[in-house]
Image: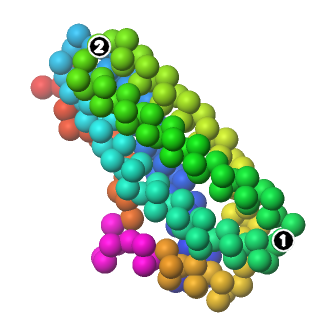
Amino acid sequence: MPRGDCLDQLDASHDRQVRALASLVAGARELEVNAHEVRAVEWGTDEVGAALAFWQRAVERHFADEELSLFPRLAARRPDLAAEIERVVAEHATHRALARAVADDFAHWEQTRAVGDAAALRAAIAELDAAHQAHVRAEEPLITAARAALTGPDLAEAAAEMDARRPAGGGGGGGGGGGGGGGRRGAG
């Protein structure tokens, strides 16, 4: 992988995470606001389910890429950033807990199909979304610092480790929802 490609991969992963969260927000809105419309509920259910599956698969791998491959190398080259790196890595546990809460709320909504439970799901997603947006903003300067501080061999080693975490033939994590399967209102 040429210099910087693993950093570009992490940036692209952040973009996919943002899209997955947008899918979660849109899907949960449909479940809450249009609960009486079968197609809206089908679409919302598909959207939330696909985005959650993405989050559970790809985001955990992304966290490992940062925690095990990128940030240790950056901390070694830029010890002045160690405290910020530690803080950002600690936020991953918060994101994991928030994502579990979203998954639990979605599973509960699937059992009840109650508007109140859809509202709770939407609130949990909003909390995850806000935390994630702040987290990505905090990581951006670290990615910029990595571009300046890490050597070609550092980046090549990180890229090899990241590649080893992925299934053979790619399969980084998909598009993170979006597109659902149930069809939007007014379709057909």
Front one among 183 and 107: 107
Q: Is residue 69 left or right of residue 37?
A: right
Front one among 84 and 97: 97
Q: Is residue 72 above or below residue 99?
A: below
Q: Quadrant of the C terminus?
A: top left
What amino acid is found at the position of numbered circle 1 in the picture?
Pro
Q: What label sits on residue 114 in the rendered view?
A: 2
Residue 30 horizontal/vertical position (percent): 33, 21
Majority SS type along the magenta span: loop
Q: What label sits on residue 79 in the rendered view?
A: 1
Residue 52 horizontal/vertical position (percent): 36, 42
What span is in magenta? 163-171
What amino acid is found at the position of numbered circle 2 in the picture?
Ala
Q: Is residue 185 above or below residue 143?
A: above
For the question of whether residue 55 can be seen, the reply is yes
Residue 118 horizontal/vertical position (percent): 36, 19
Residue 54 horizontal/vertical position (percent): 37, 50
For the question of whether residue 12 can be seen, the reply is no
Q: Is residue 28 above or below residue 35?
A: below
Disc 2 from disc 1: Cα separation: 51 Å
Q: What label sits on residue 153 in the rendered view?
A: none
Q: Characterize the local packing of mark 2: few (<14), some (14-19) or many (20 or more) Cα atoms within 10 angstroms.
A: some
Badge 1 marks a residue whose secondary structure is helix
Badge 2 marks a residue whose secondary structure is loop
Q: Magenta span has 181? A: no
Q: Magenta span has 167? A: yes
- Name the residue: 54% across, 59% down: 63
